[in-house]
Image (cartoon, rainbow, N blue to C red):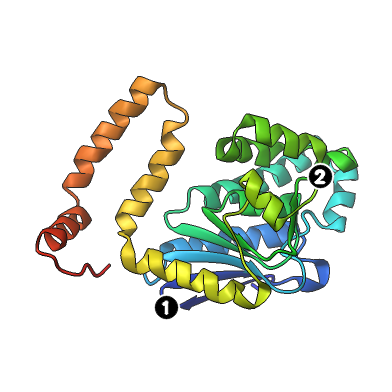
């Protein structure tokens, strides 16, 4: 797999987009490799946090030119197959059983912005721009809007998706598209330090359960969500991590996760 690289460093699984000469644009092959690599990171017991990053000047420019050309001649069935492949990738990242941090060193546009949208945390450099530019070429940001509305709400999502405008990282942060903006020199170290805090300070089981609940409750009524939350609360009390954490807290011992 050459379009996507994978390595593990101190319990962090680094997934790297490796198509810098094409601004890491998404081809069918690259989407397939990303699916496989995220599955690999999810199953790797030595990995607790995943970092998605990229080589080159751009994080990801969206669909590549060849894919855009192919859309013009594909049948509906062929386009649906391509669309479903990207859907499965976005869903895989969004529901991954581990925390995913996007390390954005350059522009994240259209489908590339979609990649960052489905991550749990986004760190970016000031020069990076974010935007859903599909409407500018007569396309629609169909898949990402499902996740974006969940993430930042309908009003903000409407503006971003319908305007097709690009925003530098600090403005994107105000819209809720990224969490931290740091200098290019500090980006990798800052993401590493943040990931290590999650790894050392937080229970992996607790983060997974919380992440699953955030996803699940949004499709429930208030009463259904509260009943589900009460059940999760009760089950969490019996988990090994909860017993370990409470015991350490009561005995004033340092918890080692």
Residue located farthest toward the left when viewing the structure as drawn: 251
Q: CA distance from mark 1 to mark 2?
A: 38 Å
Please tell me whether residue 73 is drawn above or below residue 1 in the rendered image.
above
Q: Quadrant of the N terminus?
A: bottom right
* Viewer-closest of 245 and 215: 245
Residue name at image x 83 percent, y 53 percent: 67
Residue picked out by circle 2: 165
* Viewer-closest of 76 and 238: 238
Image location of residue 104, percent across then percent down? 65, 64
Residue name at image x 67 percent, y 37 percent: 145
Task: Find residue 253 and report its image quarter.
Answer: bottom left
Residue picked out by circle 1: 10
Q: What element does badge 2 sit on? A: loop
Q: Earlier in the sequence, mark 1 or mark 2?
A: 1
Please tell me whether residue 27 is drawn above or below residue 256 in the rendered image.
above
Residue name at image x 45 percent, y 58 percent: 99
From the viewer's perspective, tell me whether residue 148 is left or right of residue 58. Answer: left
Whether the residues at callouts 1 and 2 have beta carbons within 8 Å, the answer is no
From the viewer's perspective, tell me whether residue 256 is left or right of residue 93. Answer: left
Q: Around disc 1, counting alpha carbons within 10 Å, would you say few (fewer than 14), some (14 to 19), or many (20 or more)?
A: few
Q: Around disc 2, counting alpha carbons within 10 Å, would you say few (fewer than 14), some (14 to 19), or many (20 or more)?
A: some
* Viewer-closest of 227 and 123: 123
Q: Is residue 2 visible?
A: no
Task: Find residue 198 and report its image quarter.
Answer: bottom left
């Amino acid at each position: 797999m050459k379009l996507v690289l994978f390595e593990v460093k101190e319990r962090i699984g680094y997934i790297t987009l490796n198509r810098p000469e094409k601004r890491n644009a998404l081809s069918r092959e690259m989407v397939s490799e990303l699916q496989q690599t995220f599955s690999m990171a999810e199953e790797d017991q030595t990995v607790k946090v995943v970092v998605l990053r990229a080589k080159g000047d751009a994080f990801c420019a969206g669909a590549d030119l060849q894919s855009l050309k192919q859309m013009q001649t594909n049948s509906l069935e062929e386009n649906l197959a391509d669309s479903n492949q990207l859907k499965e990738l976005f869903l895989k990242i969004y529901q991954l059983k581990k925390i995913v941090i996007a390390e954005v060193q350059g522009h994240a546009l259209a489908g590339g912005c979609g990649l960052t949208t489905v991550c749990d945390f986004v760190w970016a450099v000031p020069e990076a721009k974010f935007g859903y530019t599909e409407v500018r070429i007569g396309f629609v940001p169909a898949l990402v809007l499902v996740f974006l509305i969940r993430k930042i709400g309908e009003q903000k999502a409407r503006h971003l998706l319908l305007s097709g405008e690009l925003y530098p990282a600090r403005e994107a942060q105000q819209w809720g598209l990224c969490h931290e903006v740091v200098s290019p020199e500090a980006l990798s170290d800052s993401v590493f330090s943040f990931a290590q805090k999650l790894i050392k300070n937080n229970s992996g089981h607790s983060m997974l359960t919380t992440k699953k609940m955030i996803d699940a409750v949004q499709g429930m009524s208030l009463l259904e969500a509260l009943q589900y939350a009460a059940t999760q609360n009760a089950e969490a009390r019996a988990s090994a991590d909860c017993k370990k954490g409470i015991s350490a807290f009561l005995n004033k011992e340092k918890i080692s996760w």
